[in-house]
Image (tube, rainbow, N blue to C red):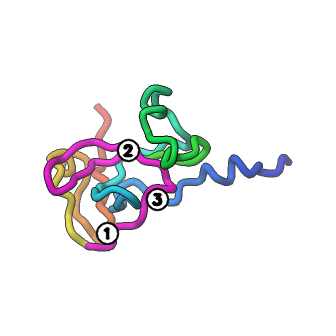
Amino acid sequence: MARPTACSVNREAKFRIGQLVRHRIFPFRGVIFDVDPEFNNSEQWYQSIPAEIRPRKDQPFYHLLAENEETHYEAYVSEQNLLPDESGEPIGHPQVNALFGKLHDNKYELLKRHAH
């Protein structure tokens, strides 16, 4: 049996779908709706991040329904730049209700989808 490598160990996501999080550097928060085990966006997007704050690619990246004081949007954020949001405040993003149910303990319930 093969031993897990350091890289595979790093890919286990710290945060879960439905969890409220906030950005470590920038003033926004959101709810996770998808997770990539490692960076899975364009190289152009990656290079647009200033080098001094550019995250490693070999870690989970999270898709968020995000909000700041001005607007709602989708964000793609590395694990190293996220912290749990323990405010208990719901996310006001208009797509939250399409994906999630009730908010309990800083985590949204995932709505069950029915196959047709």
- Whether 56 is drawn above or below 80: the answer is above
Q: CA distance from mark 1 to mark 3?
A: 12 Å
How many dots with numbers? 3
Please tell me which residue lies in front, 72 or 88.
72
The secondary structure type at the circle numbered 2 is strand
To which residue does mark 1 refer? 106
- Classify residue 11 as left or right of residue 82: right
* Residue under the point 57% across and 41% down: 57
Mark 1 packing: few (<14 Cα in 10 Å), some, or many (20+)? some
| Residue 79 is a magenta residue | yes
Question: Which quadrant is the C terminus positioned in?
Answer: top left
- Classify residue 101 as left or right of residue 63: left
Circles 2, 1 touching at the beta carbon (< 8 Å) = no
Q: CA distance from mark 2 to mark 1?
A: 17 Å
Q: Position of residue 47 (x, y in %)?
A: 48, 32
Q: Earlier in the sequence, mark 1 or mark 3?
A: 3
Extent of the magenta region? 63-87
> Of the residues shown, which amino acid type is indicated by label 1?
Asn
Q: Which mark is residue 15?
A: 3
To which residue does mark 2 refer? 63
- Classify residue 105 as left or right of residue 56: left
Q: Position of residue 15 (x, y in %)?
A: 46, 59
Q: Earlier in the sequence, mark 2 or mark 1?
A: 2
Q: Earlier in the sequence, mark 2 or mark 3?
A: 3
Q: Position of residue 105 (x, y in %)?
A: 32, 73
> Of the residues shown, which amino acid type is indicated by label 2?
His
| Residue 81 is a magenta residue | yes
* Residue under the point 50% across and 27% down: 43
> Of the residues shown, which amino acid type is indicated by label 3?
Phe
Please tell me which residue lies in front, 2 or 114.
2
